Image: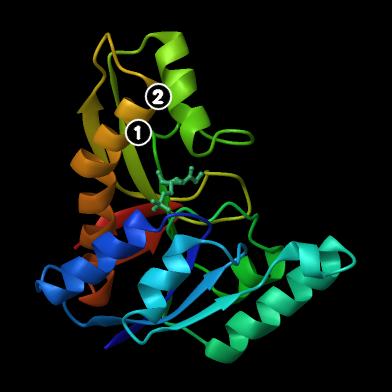
Amino acid sequence: MLRLLVCVSGGGTNLQAILDAIDHGIITNARVETVISNNENAYALERARSRGIEALCLSPKSYETRELFNQAFTDRVKRINPDLIVLAGFLVAIPAAMIEAFENRIINIHPSLIPSFCGVGFYGLRVHEAVLARGVKVTGATVHFVDGGMDTGPILLQKAVEVCQQDTPRELQQRVMEQAEWKILPQAIDLIANGRVEVTEGKAYII
Ligand code: GAR
């Protein structure tokens, strides 16, 4: 049974999609052990607590320096020692020491088709604003492993979503979540939980 740590910053609809997928047998062989947020008001923490899942807040604001936060965050995660860390809308840069300790054991959901609309400054609604400003006709979501760069790790799953001419950023965000994120994130976890993913030379393969 794969023990998951899910890291969240906001509403936690992707966390909910994971929990629902476990309930419905779409994800097998995995359970959410702990949820961590950098934001104590994140509704995602409520979603976890209401199901009896350990949910804690670790905020950079509670530490004097970023280094001290990074140290505390990494230590805590090492103590939990999850099999897989899922970044489900987690808007904090993962400390290098944590990436090293959990190589190929951290995945992230990003709301665009990487390598478009990703990297520094592209998160949340900003991604969809940039997509609409550029006028692309297709966007989507990507699940990738986390390496030392920003959205640069091996890509595991992607799903395309149509952009409509009248879309507002919020409408587009909702469609990308419904049609892509809430599907490929649970699917990725199920593949990993069932030993069907291999990462070799910077690329992820489904076996
Ligand atoms: C999601 O759209 C996720 O892809 C995005 O934040 C949102 C969180 O929503 N993540 C990023 O932009 C990471 N670069 P949620 O809290 O409802 O799951």
Q: Secondary structure at mark 1?
A: helix
Which residue is drawn at the image coordinates 36% and 19% (left, top)?
168
Question: Compared with residue 54, is residue 206 higher up or lower down, i.e. above or below?
Answer: above
Image quadrant where residue 99 sits: bottom right
Name the outermost residue toward the right.
Answer: 64
Image quadrant where residue 136 sits: top left
Q: In the rendered view, how is the structure colored?
A: rainbow
Q: Secondary structure at mark 2?
A: helix
Residue 117 in the figure: left or right of residue 196: right
Crowdedness near tag 2: few (<14), some (14–19) or many (≥20) residues, C-alpha within 10 Å? some
Using the numbered discs, state the Cα–Cα distance from disc 2 to disc 1 in whole angstroms: 6 Å
Which residue is drawn at the image coordinates 42% and 71% (left, top)?
46
Q: Amino acid at mark 1?
A: Gln
Task: For residue 130, say whether it is visible.
Answer: yes
Across and down, in percent, residue 203 comes to 39, 51
9 and 41: which one is in front?
A: 41
Which residue is drawn at the image coordinates 51% and 61% (left, top)?
42
Q: Amino acid at mark 2?
A: Pro
Across and down, in percent, residue 55 comes to 49, 79
- Residue 169 image label: 2
Q: Name the residue beneath numbered marker 1.
A: 173
Across and down, in percent, residue 24 comes to 9, 71
Crowdedness near tag 1: few (<14), some (14–19) or many (≥20) residues, C-alpha within 10 Å? many
Question: Compared with residue 105, is residue 3 higher up or lower down, i.e. above or below?
Answer: below
Image quadrant where residue 132 sits: top left
Question: Compared with residue 48, is residue 206 higher up or lower down, i.e. above or below?
Answer: above
Q: Given contact means CB atoms under 8 Å apart, are the residues at marks 2 and 1 in contact?
A: yes
- Residue 62 image label: none
Residue 122 in the figure: left or right of residue 176: right
Q: Is mark 1 within 8 Å of ligand 1?
A: yes
Which quadrant holds the C terminus? bottom left
